[in-house]
Image: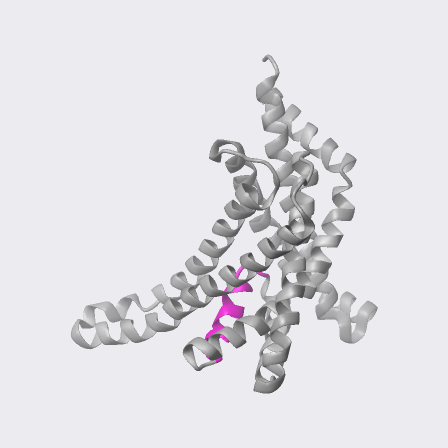
């Protein structure tokens, strides 16, 4: 227990030294700014590949599944309004800008990880930007594929019920499918970020402790912050009026970003502890 405490204390100290508080605010703002452009790109991709924008709505639901309901509901409503109001001619023009702004959110994560792992970034800025754009494109395609499976699931389930009524009593599994899809997105994204996004090379044994701690702390932060907003949401309305939902989302993303950076700092602290004698 004493050694675990030393590792946690070292991680927190490095979090402060590496300006984790400021980097977390940068990540939160960048992610919030990248969310709408990313979903605009997803909408364009869904319209071109499947001829439908409903998959984009499902993608937004999956992305916000792990968010507290008080925050997710107004954000999802605004996302739906934005995507429904897009004209096809404007959508074509907006895709390039959407990809660029969405890739900026990836770059903010890279900065935080490089600071935490203490590795210098030696690759060219244009190469990093291209890599971030590829992450956006691949992420959008993967989310659309996952959304397609989630949308297709009720149809498959209804067909199965027609031939085997015993399945009808397990209809609640649909909600588990949605939650499972959101969990898959989060876990895969964390592994990709720690494994490939940051500079340098790391093995699986070097990144899983921080990822596990990140997932646990994210779950706890989501529950606590959701209950706080459910009880004291009027304070945000008093302070920020019409911007209350945006500010609540920004504060939540700030907490998420702090935990994300701390997870990387914890991995770095574990690596330093393994090099020291017991």
> As drawn, is 16 to the left or to the right of 48?
right
* x, y percent for residue 128: 63, 51
> As drawn, is 154 to the left or to the right of 138?
left
**Camera-side residue: 121 or 165?**
121
> As drawn, is 16 to the left or to the right of 45?
right
From what the image shows, is residue 271 above or below residue 19?
above
Image quarter hosting the C terminus:
top right
**Camera-side residue: 91 or 218?**
91
* x, y percent for residue 46: 47, 75
* x, y percent for residue 251: 72, 58
Quarter occupied by residue 236: bottom right
**Camera-side residue: 14 or 7?**
14
From what the image shows, is residue 3 above or below residue 266?
above
- Which stretch appears magenta? 53-67
From what the image shows, is residue 263 above or below residue 152?
above
In the image, what residue occupies the spot 62% across and 51% down? 127
Q: Residue furthest right?
A: 239
């Amino acid at each position: 227990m004493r050694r675990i405490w030393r590792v946690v204390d070292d991680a927190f100290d490095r979090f402060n030294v590496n300006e984790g508080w400021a980097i977390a605010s940068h990540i939160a703002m960048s992610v919030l700014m990248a969310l709408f452009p990313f979903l605009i790109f997803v909408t364009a991709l869904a319209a071109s590949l499947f001829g439908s924008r409903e998959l984009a709505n499902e993608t937004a639901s999956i992305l916000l599944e792990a968010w507290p309901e008080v925050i997710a509901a107004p954000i999802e409503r605004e996302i739906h309004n934005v995507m429904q109001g897009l004209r096809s001619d404007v959508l074509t023009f907006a895709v390039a800008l959407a990809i660029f702004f969405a890739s900026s959110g990836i770059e903010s994560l890279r900065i935080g990880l490089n600071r935490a792992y203490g590795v210098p970034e030696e690759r060219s800025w244009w190469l990093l930007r291209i890599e971030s754009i590829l992450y956006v494109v691949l992420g959008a395609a993967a989310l659309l594929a996952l959304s397609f499976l989630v949308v297709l699931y009720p149809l498959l389930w209804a067909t199965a019920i027609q031939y085997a009524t015993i399945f009808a009593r397990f209809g609640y599994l649909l909600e588990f499918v949605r939650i499972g899809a959101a969990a898959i997105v989060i876990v895969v994204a964390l592994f990709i970020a720690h494994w490939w996004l940051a500079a340098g090379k790391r093995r699986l044994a070097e990144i899983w402790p921080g990822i596990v701690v990140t997932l646990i702390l994210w779950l706890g932060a989501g529950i606590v912050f959701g209950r706080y907003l459910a009880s004291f949401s009027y304070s945000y309305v008093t302070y920020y009026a019409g911007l209350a939902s945006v500010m609540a989302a920004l504060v939540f993303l700030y907490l998420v970003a702090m935990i994300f950076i701390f997870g990387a700092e914890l991995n770095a602290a574990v690596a330093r502890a393994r090099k020291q004698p017991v």
